[in-house]
């Protein structure tokens, strides 16, 4: 009886809560949907420098809108000017000799758009950077939202051990590469006729996948007596993906920044990586260092910076104390009606078998073609033999 009385009350309360929730539809004015976005840098480890110019799109129809036919130049504080070439995709490229890419040099970019608007950045100094001191990993288990439920893996960390004359502001970008294998070589396949390859063809079994880690990592040692820092947490790799099964590599690229560039990237990190609830703080309004000289009221998005760049690559395999729980992506399907089940869209249809013969069991593409999981069969030049 008590349950019967409480239930209607709960339903009324829930209905009132739902009625109080209204969909938030932000008002985006037309001008905000066509702002100029500039992204680029002058880096001392690159002889070909790239500046990207695009425009923002409607929020309900996101797309990349390149801006073509701009006049782009980079100018240093000695008055040297370098003209960029339009690559016809929003990218503008310029070869700059290494002798100009030295710490202490200040750079700015100047852009003249097809509408004859002049965009200029603030001066950005290329600060010194002794290098990546050390990159390593430690075993780590991350607790999920369910108490007692952990994801096992490894956490990469970086140490900073630079001189007092080096920059105090840093940003890191990470690129991971891992080797992975398909489960079977090609022996038997069907494309209207049954074929056999012996010895087995293993050319599609071994792949390497390279991905940018989609996170921003920043640090300042401004408040420290020494330009040193230990164990800055970086990327976490779990034990349920194929990344740690064979051999894994992490390339850590360290950028030295000015204070203003650091503030920009650190705020961008906050906006992109903090995932809060309904009542968490609002995203920061990030101000770049580009200005529309022709129309000062027109905001230009993005940031142009200069940096000395250092990098370090490490390899990981057979992590002590970490049991891998990766489950193969390969699926086998019994062909109960034999080859009659296969249609041209299945070709080539790989069949399970050995040198003695095949059985009516279909190996899906991922069992044989490792490229189906996103990698390539070309071993990177830096990969160990």
Image: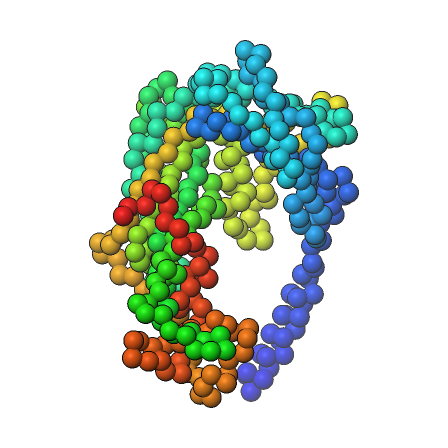
The answer to which quarter of the image holds residue 167 is top left
Is 266 above or below relative to 350? above
Please identify the quadrant where the N terminus is shown: bottom right
In x, y percent, where is residue 156? 33, 45
Question: What sort of colour scheme is used for the picture?
Answer: rainbow
Asked whether, in this view, residue 372 is left or right of residue 226, the answer is: right
Residue drawn where x is 51% and y is 41% of the image: 270
Q: Which quarter of the picture shows residue 85?
A: top right
Residue at screen point 53% across, 45% down: 272
> Could you tell me if residue 305 is visible in this image?
no
**Rendered residue at 45%/25% (across/down):** 44
| Residue 69 percent across, percent down from the top left | 70, 32
Residue 151 in the image: x percent, y percent?
35, 59
Report the residue at 39% width, 47% height from top.
176
Rendering coords of residue 209 (x, y %) = 41, 52
Q: Number of callouts in the render?
A: 0
Judge left or right: residue 19 versus residue 92. right
């Amino acid at each position: 009886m008590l349950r019967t009385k409480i239930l209607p009350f709960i339903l009324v309360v829930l209905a009132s809560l739902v009625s109080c929730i209204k969909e938030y539809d932000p008002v985006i004015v037309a001008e905000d949907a066509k702002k100029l976005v500039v992204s680029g840098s002058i880096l001392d480890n690159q002889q070909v420098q790239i500046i990207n110019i695009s425009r923002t799109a409607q929020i309900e129809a996101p797309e990349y809108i390149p801006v073509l036919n701009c006049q782009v130049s980079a100018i240093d504080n000695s008055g040297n000017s370098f003209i960029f070439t339009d690559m016809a995709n929003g990218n503008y490229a310029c070869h700059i000799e290494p002798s100009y890419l030295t710490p202490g040099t200040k750079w700015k970019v100047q852009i003249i758009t097809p509408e004859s608007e002049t965009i200029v950045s603030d001066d950005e100094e290329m600060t010194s950077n002794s290098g990546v001191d050390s990159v390593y990993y430690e075993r780590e288990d991350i607790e999920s939202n369910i108490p007692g439920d952990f994801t096992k893996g490894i956490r990469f960390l970086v140490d900073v051990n630079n001189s007092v004359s080096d920059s105090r502001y840093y940003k890191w970008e990470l690129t991971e590469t891992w080797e992975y294998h398909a489960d079977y070589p090609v022996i038997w396949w069907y494309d209207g006729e049954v074929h056999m390859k012996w010895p087995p063809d293993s050319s599609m079994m071994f792949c390497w996948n390279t991905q940018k880690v989609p996170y921003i990592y920043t640090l300042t040692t401004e408040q420290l007596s020494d330009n040193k820092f230990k164990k800055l947490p970086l990327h976490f790799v779990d034990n349920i993906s194929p990344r740690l099964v064979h051999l894994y590599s992490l390339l850590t690229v360290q950028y030295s920044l000015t204070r203003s560039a650091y503030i920009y990237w650190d705020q961008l990190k906050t906006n992109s990586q903090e995932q809060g609830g309904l009542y968490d703080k609002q995203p920061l309004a990030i101000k770049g260092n580009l200005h529309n000289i022709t129309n000062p009221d027109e905001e230009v998005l993005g940031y142009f910076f200069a940096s000395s760049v250092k990098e370090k690559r490490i390899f990981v395999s057979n992590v002590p104390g970490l049991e891998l729980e990766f489950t193969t992506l390969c699926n086998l399907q019994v062909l109960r009606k034999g080859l009659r089940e296969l249609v041209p869209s299945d070709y080539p249809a790989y069949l399970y078998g050995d040198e003695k013969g095949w059985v009516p069991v279909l190996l899906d593409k991922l069992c044989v073609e490792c490229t189906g999981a996103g990698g390539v069969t070309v071993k990177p030049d830096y990969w160990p033999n």
